[in-house]
Each structure stands twice: as structure tokens, then as C-alpha cells.
Image (cartoon, coloured by chain):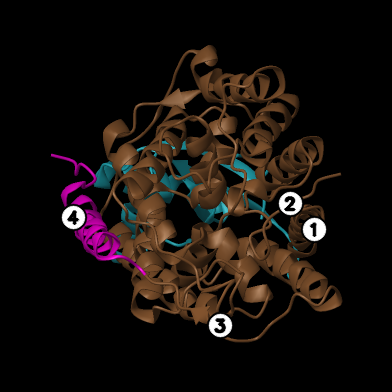
């Protein structure tokens, strides 16, 4: 089994925002991947963006540029 | 103990829910139905007099228990969150579509899995439709579909549906106002207290595991993520073992007495509509009940749409009939989808497409 690591997890208000995030990240070559929202941070069943903690600044800047607003940015074991 | 931090524990939650369904089937719930959200909402709508189909009227304590179980566990574990305001009436319509599609097939996605575990090949055929429906919903998501965000609202607002469900339970226990079938599927049920406890346990485990049939397929298609699917596998394995052990496993299509039909095209299209609408609404019928229990008024409205859809199905003759054995001639009478049901199913699919491609995420100007 893959060992869990502390990661940056960005949650969104809608699934569409998460999909837009995936598209924008691919276009701008921003690292990370889409994952289901970890159960430890939400009772919802939506999608979130998971990346290394070190990518936080780059991700925040790209979201600002693309007009994607996060619900929250978490640091949790994924 | 965290029940949701590994696939094994999630599968365990599915096993618990499977055991609940198996116990209720053993104690009297209709054969091969055990625990069906669509059928049970339809029966409850009948008990409230929303439709007059005398064979499917009974206030199913399982539905009440699911909502209350999710409500209690979410409050206890601080996951209760009262939210509302995401395309309310669109969700009502999606609830109607989910119900109409389910009653064309004769079961929600949960019952589809239960029917599959009992060897009903019609359900395996319908699974293809369900997967295509979810895939179409995923395609819409990729194209920017959105019903808009929900907002946090007054705490009491999210508790309205659980209170209404508790009200139905009080009526069932203390009055003779509710209708109850004397024959047919509505007359077949486990004892009230067992059904209620079963619903509470199922609801609590479904809330903690985020169990969702549409969500599990969506996550596989979108991310190759099998977390939610492991819950379904747990439930399927238990029901399969139960059906084999009790002689209820009958492999075949035209099996009388299990409330199913072999109209393959309509089994596929019915579950296509359900899969499509469930992805657009953000969850299968079970998940809508659970989300409503944990405070989502949007899901509560979807549940009301399902009640309304159930009433329409029986008032307008949309629901399919199951293959049955003629008691006098001993001949097998094939179940079928009536013309009204076929037309309604097509309309439902068209409405899903209209919703999917007219509700878009607002881009940055």
C-alpha cells in the first residue's frame, strides 16, 4: 500500500470549479492531481486538488490568474 | 476508530450495510428488494396518499431511519452542516427523473446491486445503462456543468427533513392515518422496529463511508479512484453470500416473484436516466437521503422531487410491472414498461441533457 504523505489539498465550492482547476493546471503545467475530497476534511463527496506543500504559492497564483476560488486550502495526509 | 481511512474499512462499512439489508430481507422485506430507496420512497408516498396504487403503500421505517441515522451521526461527529441555495427547483426535477427512471427499471442503484447479487440478469443489463448514464454526467461535468454553490444557512433549516421524517414515524406509531397495503409488495415488510433500527444503522454507516452508487462510478471514470467502489463491493459480497446460503440466488432473466422485468432496452434506458440525473444532482437516491440528513436542503428538495416523481409514476401509469406467475393458470406473465413509462423515460433523458448543457459554471469575466 502507498505510504500516506502530508499534502496540500484545495477544496472548492462546486465540482465544476474542481474540473476547471484540473483544466487550468494542465494548461499551465502546474503540478498536482484531482482526488475525491478526503473524508477527514469534509462530509461531502466532491473533488479536490492535491499537490505537494511546496507548490502552494504557484497554485495560488495560477488560481488567482484563472479566476478559480477555493473553498479552503488544507494540509492533510493523503 | 476512523471507519473511512482505508479501502478495507470502507468495504467493512459496505459489509455492515449488506448485513442490514440481508437481515431485513430475512425478516420479511420483499424478495430481492431488501433495501431499495426508490421502492421505499414510492411506498411511503403511497402511505401518505400521494398515489392510490393499493399494493405499494407502506411508510417504510428504513427511509425514516436512513435520514435520522445520518442526522444523528453527523451531529454527533460534528459533520452536520446546514446548507442550501444550489439550483433548488432543478434539483427537484432531477429527483423526479431519478424516481421515474428507477420505476421504469424497478429499483434504485442500491436495489440494482441487490438484484445483481441474487442472480437477476436484468439488473446486470441495466448496470450497463447506469454506467453510460454516469459517464454522460461526467462528460457534462468536464464541459463545465454546475448547479452553482450551496451556502451555509440557518442551522435549523437543515433539520427540517429529519423532523418531517420523525413526524411520519409518529403518525405510523400513533395513528391510523397512513395507508398500508394488505397485498402486494407494500404488505411485505420486516417488523417496524427492525426496519427502523436497520435504517438508522445503514444511514450512520452510509454517512461515515460517503456510500454512493453514482459517485463510485463517477470516481472510477473521472479519477480511476476505487474508494467508494470498495463500499459497494462489500455490500454486494454479503448479499451474494446471503442469497446463495438461503437459496434465493436464481440466475436468469424471466424469474417470477422478484419484481423485475426483462424489457432490456427499458432496463438500460431507465438506469441511464438514473445514472445521468444522479451525477448532475451530486449523488444517487441513497446519497440524497444521507446528504439531506446531514443538513443539505438541496438534497432534501431532491428527496421531495423523488416523492413527487413516485406519485406521478403511479398516478399516470409510468411504472413498470414485474414478471409474475398467474395463480390460476400457473403461466409466467412477462413484466413490461407501459407506453406512458417509455415516453416519460425518453422525456427524462432529454431533460437531463437540457439541464446538463444549460447549467454552466460562471467563467471569470
- Disc 2 is attached to a residue of which chain? B
Question: Mark 4 highlights which residue?
Answer: B357
Taking the image as shown, residue B71 lies to the left or right of residue A20, namely right
- Along the line of sight, the residue nearer the viewer: B317 or B332: B332
Quadrant location of the C terminus of chain B in the rendered image: top left
The verdict on a common chain for dots 1 and 4 is: yes
Compare marks 2 and 1 and give the one earlier in the sequence: 2
Compare marks 4 and 2 and give the one earlier in the sequence: 2
Residue at 69% over, 82% down: B250
Residue B142 numbered tag: none
Q: Chain A's colour?
A: cyan
Circle 2 sits in a helix, a strand or a loop, which is it? loop
Residue B9 numbered tag: 1
Please tell me whether mark 4 or mark 2 is closer to you in this view.
Answer: 4
- Along the line of sight, the residue nearer the viewer: B58 or A44: B58
Compare marks 1 and 4 and give the one earlier in the sequence: 1
Q: Chain B's colour?
A: brown
Label 4 to label 2: alpha-carbon separation:
34 Å
- Along the line of sight, the residue nearer the viewer: B50 or B332: B332
Task: Locate residue B21: give its quadrant.
Answer: bottom right
Task: Locate residue B201: give its quadrant.
Answer: top right
Q: How many circles with numbers are drawn on the protein?
A: 4
Residue B121 numbered tag: 3
Please state the extent of the stretch shown in magenta in the rendering.
B337-365
Please tell me whether mark 1 or mark 3 is closer to you in this view.
Answer: 3
Residue at 50% over, 67% down: B217
Residues at discs 2 and 1 in contact (Cβ within 8 Å): yes
Amino acid at each position: 500500500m502507498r505510504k500516506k504523505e502530508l499534502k496540500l489539498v484545495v477544496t472548492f465550492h462546486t465540482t465544476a470549479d474542481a474540473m476547471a482547476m484540473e483544466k487550468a493546471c494542465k494548461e499551465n503545467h502546474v503540478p498536482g492531481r484531482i482526488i475525491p475530497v478526503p473524508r477527514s476534511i469534509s462530509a461531502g463527496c466532491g473533488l479536490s486538488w492535491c499537490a505537494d506543500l511546496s507548490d502552494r504559492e504557484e497554485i495560488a497564483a495560477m488560481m488567482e490568474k484563472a479566476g478559480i476560488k477555493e473553498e479552503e486550502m488544507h494540509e492533510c495526509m493523503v | 476508530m476512523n471507519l473511512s481511512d482505508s479501502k478495507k474499512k470502507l468495504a467493512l462499512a459496505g459489509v455492515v450495510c449488506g448485513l442490514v439489508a440481508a437481515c431485513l430481507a430475512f425478516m420479511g422485506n420483499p424478495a430481492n428488494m431488501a433495501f431499495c430507496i426508490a421502492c421505499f420512497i414510492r411506498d411511503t408516498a403511497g402511505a401518505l396518499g400521494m398515489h392510490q396504487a393499493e399494493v405499494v403503500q407502506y411508510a417504510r421505517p428504513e427511509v425514516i431511519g436512513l435520514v435520522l441515522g445520518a442526522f444523528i451521526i453527523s451531529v454527533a461527529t460534528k459533520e452536520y452542516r446546514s446548507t442550501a441555495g444550489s439550483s433548488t427547483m432543478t434539483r427537484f426535477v432531477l429527483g423526479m427523473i431519478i424516481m421515474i427512471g428507477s420505476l421504469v427499471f424497478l429499483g434504485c442503484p442500491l436495489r440494482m446491486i441487490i438484484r445483481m447479487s441474487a442472480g437477476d440478469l436484468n439488473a446486470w443489463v441495466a448496470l450497463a445503462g447506469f454506467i453510460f448514464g454516469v459517464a454522460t454526467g461526467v462528460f457534462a461535468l468536464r464541459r463545465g456543468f454546475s448547479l452553482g454553490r450551496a451556502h451555509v444557512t440557518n442551522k435549523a433549516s437543515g433539520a427540517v427533513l429529519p423532523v418531517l421524517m420523525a413526524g411520519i414515524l409518529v403518525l405510523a406509531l400513533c395513528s391510523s392515518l397512513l395507508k398500508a397495503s394488505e397485498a402486494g409488495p407494500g404488505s411485505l415488510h420486516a417488523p417496524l422496529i427492525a426496519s427502523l433500527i436497520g435504517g438508522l444503522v445503514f444511514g450512520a454507516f452510509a454517512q461515515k463511508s460517503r456510500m454512493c452508487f453514482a459517485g463510485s462510478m463517477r470516481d472510477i471514470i473521472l479519477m480511476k479512484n476505487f474508494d467508494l467502489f470498495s463500499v459497494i463491493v462489500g455490500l454486494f459480497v454479503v448479499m451474494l453470500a446471503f442469497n446463495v446460503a438461503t437459496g434465493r440466488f436464481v440466475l436468469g432473466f424471466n424469474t417470477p416473484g422478484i419484481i423485475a422485468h426483462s424489457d432490456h432496452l427499458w432496463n438500460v434506458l431507465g438506469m441511464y436516466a438514473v445514472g445521468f440525473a444522479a451525477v448532475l444532482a451530486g449523488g444517487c437516491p441513497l446519497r440524497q437521503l444521507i446528504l439531506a440528513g446531514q443538513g443539505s436542503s438541496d438534497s432534501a428538495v431532491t428527496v421531495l422531487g423523488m416523492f413527487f416523481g413516485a406519485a406521478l409514476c403511479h398516478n399516470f401509469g409510468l411504472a413498470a410491472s414485474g414478471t409474475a406467475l398467474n395463480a390460476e393458470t400457473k403461466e409466467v406473465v412477462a413484466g413490461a414498461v407501459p407506453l406512458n413509462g417509455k415516453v416519460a423515460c425518453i422525456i427524462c433523458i432529454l431533460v437531463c441533457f437540457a439541464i446538463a448543457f444549460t447549467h454552466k459554471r460562471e467563467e471569470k469575466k
